[in-house]
Amino acid sequence: MAELWAIHDALSHAWSLGFRCVELETDNLEASRIMTGVSGALVDNSLVIAIRNLLSFNWEVEVHHIGRSANGVADSLARMYRGAPIGIATFAEPPTDAAATMLRDYHSL
């Protein structure tokens, strides 16, 4: 459920910022299956309904499942904010601790 909340909030934020072409990556296989309709799990869940509603907006959203090892920036940010108050953190530039991880992820492609 935590991953689905993160997906919902990320999509909501991307839409409100005016992005209309988004690639969403998650290392949670079940969450990616739920979002792409491959899995019927939680089909009546209000959060899943809200995510599917966001996906129906006039925009292009590609959902990709990626391995945890290729998602180092997300893991780095999660470690940085573990225990912080619940909310959304927005960055104009990547935090220093995550920047090196981002470069490693990029060069491993």
Image (tube, rainbow, N blue to C red):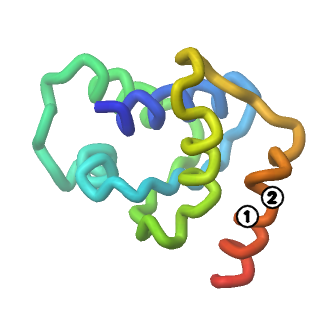
| 16 on left or right of 5 | right
Residue named by callout 2: 99
Residue at 46% across, 36% down:
7
Can you give x and y, in whole percent of width and height, for residue 81 in the image? Answer: 61, 33
Other residues around mark 2 within 10 Å, as few (<14) / some (14–19) / many (≥20)? some
Residue 26 in the image: above or below residue 7: below
Q: Quadrant of the C terminus?
A: bottom right
The foreground one among 77 and 3 is 77
The foreground one among 60 and 43 is 43
Residue named by callout 1: 102
Give yes or no for contact between labels 2 and 1 (Cβ–Cβ under 8 Å): yes
Can you give x and y, in whole percent of width and height, for residue 44 in the image? Answer: 13, 24
Residue at 47% across, 33% down:
6
SS category of the residue bearing label 1: helix
| 60 on left or right of 34 | right
Residue kind at label 2, given as amino acid type? Ala
